[in-house]
Every structure is written in C-alpha cells, then in structure tokens.
Image: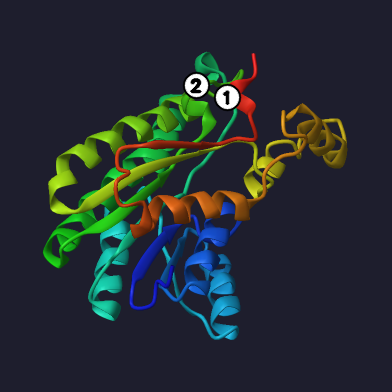
Amino acid sequence: MNWAGKVVIVTGGGGGIGQAVARRFAESGAQVVVVGRTLSKVEAVASQLTGEGLLAVAMAADVSSELDVTGVIRQTLELFGRIDVMVNNAAVCPQIRLTDMSLQEWNGVITNNLTSIFLFCRGVIPTMLQQGGGVIVNVSSVHALATLDGYSAYAASKAGIVGLTRAIALDYAKQNIRANTVLPGAVRTPMLESSVKNLDTPREEIMKQWDQSQPIGRVGQPEEIAAVVMFAASPDNSFMTGSTLVADGGMTAEL
C-alpha cells in the first residue's frame, strides 16, 4: 500500500530488523523516524534513505529512559503533527544463566525490552486517539514460546511483550488502534552475529550451523521480518489485532 502522509516511528532502527523495517516504510512513502541508542548509526540509516529521495529523520534515544522516550514522541509531533505507526523493535540479548545474573542485569533486560514498549505505547496512544486511530507493532521473539540455556531474562521480556500487546489491543480495540506482535526466529542481524563472536568456533562456521539447524534450511533475513511487520501494520489487515505472528522458518514447529 501507499503510506504517503503517514508517520512511522521505528526503534532499534540503526541496523538489522529495525533498519529493514524503516526502509520498507520509507520506500512505501512514509515519513520514518529512525530511533536508536547510537546517533551515528541511526543518522547513517536516515541519510541513506534521504539520499535515495525517501523521507526519514534520525533521533538518538535510550529506549529504557522515560525522558528520552518522551523526547522522541515530542520531537516527532513537533515535526509532523501525527504518529500513525509505532514499531517497537529495540532489544538487548545477553546470555546469562539465572543464578549468574545480577538484579541490575535482569532489570537492564526487562527495562530495555519490555518497559520501553510500555513507555512508547503509553506515549503515542493519546495522539492516536486524538487523530482517530493508529497501529502498534511490537517485535518479540520465538523465545516467548520456547527458549535456550542462558536466556531467562530475555525469554521473560519477550513473553511479556506478547501479553502486553494483547492487553493494549483489547484496551483500545474500539478506538481504532490495533496492536500486534511479531515473533522472529533466527535472523541474520548484528545481534545474532554478536552472540557468537566470543566462541572458539569461527563465526562463519557457527553461522553455517545456524543455517543447517533451521527447518527451512537457513536463518531469516531482516527484510523477511520487515515484510511481516508491514503486514501487521497494513490497513488491509484491519481485522487483526491482539495477534501473534510467528516468522521463524519452522523453528517452533519442530520437536
């Protein structure tokens, strides 16, 4: 569809899935606000898009900071006067077993991955209500359904996103605000690659093993998840809210 005139905020937009989502919306005509912790990364994404004649601006923010989140929403409204789509994609993924994890580390994961979504949704929903509607797409993970050794905080945060999204969907279903969750499986992103960089086995060998372990025969690409996010956000998908969309190459279907 044509997203001309629509304003989309994408967190975690400096790379991986967030960058792919920002590009898909921009290529469809939307004005995209690319949000990330590192200004140079989101500026690079926004500059690449604007260099192609697309519409994008970069905003640096710590998504776990209420002050920063409020600032992004305020600046977006000052620039464009509306917010049509909120894509919460930013996340951290340390691999630490529960008994080795400090409270500070636990809180860091929960705050970055889950509380950030509360903050952004709480911030954008009043504007969506005033303008007559909007869409929220929260990016979770297959770790919400089944997880691995050392991912207790990450899995808890990602499962929490699913529950939070359903609650938001019900709270605002009659006010034309839809909220859906996307659960990616293994996707070739900087986050996935960084998770294997400290292992003794060469990175490319590990990534080859990741490919071979997927039922579909390979890990996903960020653009494939971006397509699911676009589907979740599209007004052509107007009867879907509170839903959980799994895009994992068959990972969770396998015993």
In the foreground, 40 or 161: 161
Q: Secondary structure at mark 1?
A: loop
| Viewer-nearest residue: 199 or 145 | 145
Density class for disc 2 (Cα within 10 Å; few <14, some 14-19, many ≥20) is many
The amino acid type found where label 2 is placed reads: Ser
Q: Are marks 2 and 1 in contact (CB under 8 Å)?
A: yes
Is residue 181 visible to us here? yes
Check disc 1: other Cα within 10 Å, few if <14, some if 14-19, many if 20+.
some
Left or right, 194 with respect to 163, comes to: right
- The residue carrying mark 1 is 96
Residue 180 point in image, percent of width and height: 35, 43
- The three-letter amino acid code for the residue at tag 1 is Ile
Which of the numbered marks, if any, corresponds to residue 152? 2
Image quarter (top left, top right, bottom left or bottom right) of the C terminus? top right
Q: Quadrant of residue 11?
A: bottom left
Q: How is the image coloured?
A: rainbow
Q: Is residue 248 left or right of residue 29?
A: right
Q: Secondary structure at mark 2?
A: helix
Depth check, mark 2 against mark 1: the one in front is 2
Which residue is located at x 39 percent, y 32 percent?
107
CA distance separating discs 2 and 1: 8 Å
**x%, y% of residue 162?**
37, 33
Q: Which quadrant would the N terminus be assigned to in this image?
A: bottom left
For residue 87, say whether it is visible: no
Measured from the top left, where is residue 144 in percent x and y? Answer: 46, 27
Which disc is residue 208 wearing?
Answer: none
- Whichever of labels 2 and 1 marks the residue nearer the N terminus, that label is 1
Q: Position of residue 114 (x, y in %)?
A: 36, 38
